[in-house]
Amino acid sequence: MTYQPQHAGRGPTSWIVDALLWVLAIAGAVCIALVILAYTMGITLMMFSTGSMSPTIPAGSVAIVQEGPASEIEVGDVVTVDRGDLLPVTHRVTSVEPGAVDDQRIITMRGDANEQDDPQPYPVETVRTVLFSIPGLANVIVWFGDPLVLGGITIAMALLVGWAFWPKQERSRPAALAGAEQ
């Protein structure tokens, strides 16, 4: 009996599926590493639905922001501040004043597309500084959040994994070849 490697007789579809599984495995590992880094470094995503920071950060962009102490804020920084029950606001800092306590700062901000500063100053102890932004990415994230898209991706991945691990049947050999090997 002769040795035949497992990959002998595999078709191009099998190679494509293997390559796709490797790409997905690597992408999954990268995602896990990014989540761990984001968590440990205080990095989050901010999606922009308005154009108040245009043209610097147009509507539909996603900004990568990092949380830090308010004591490090400087005029000209683009930061995100929380506003209680309202959505956070991301604008450019126009002034920084000391707050009631050592760690607190009172900042005024203005969107790049706005003509006036925001109506009220913001007392903050921490802010999220914009590291960079990616225009148009918010629309992609929203699309991936659609239940039909998520369901379709889940079904496709389940089928791909099931197909990859499905037991393969050996092909029967003609009797003449089987007898010759003995």
Image (spheres, rainbow, N blue to C red):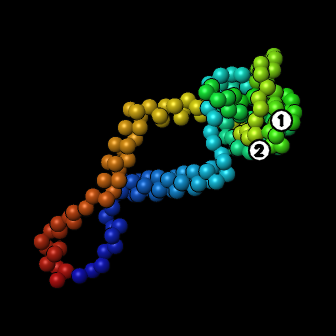
User: Quarter of the image containing the N terminus?
Assistant: bottom left
| Mark 2 crowd level (few <14, some 14–19, many ≥20, 10 Å Cα) | some
Q: Residue 135 appears in which quarter of the rendering? A: top right
Q: Is residue 159 left or right of residue 35?
A: left
Q: Position of residue 129 (x, y in %)?
A: 74, 39
Question: N-terminal of the two: label 2 or label 1?
Answer: 2
Q: Is residue 38 left or right of residue 170?
A: right
Q: Is residue 19 left or right of residue 86?
A: left
How many marks overall? 2
Q: Position of residue 155 (x, y in %)?
A: 34, 43
Tag 2 and tag 1, C-beta contact below 8 Å: no
Q: Residue 9 appears in which quarter of the rendering? A: bottom left
Amino acid beneath label 2: Pro
Q: Which residue is rendered at x = 25% and y = 62% of the image?
A: 168
Amino acid beneath label 1: Gly
Q: Nearer the viewer, mark 2 or mark 1?
A: 1
Residue situated in front as seen by the camera: 133 or 15: 133
User: Quarter of the image containing the C terminus?
Assistant: bottom left
Residue situated in front as seen by the camera: 57 or 21: 57
**Helix, strand or loop status at disc 2:** strand
* Residue placed under numbered mark 1 in the picture: 99
Q: Which residue is rendered at x = 71% and y = 30% of the image?
A: 90
Residue 166 visible in the current orientation: yes
Q: Position of residue 11 (x, y in %)?
A: 34, 57
* Residue placed under numbered mark 2 in the picture: 69
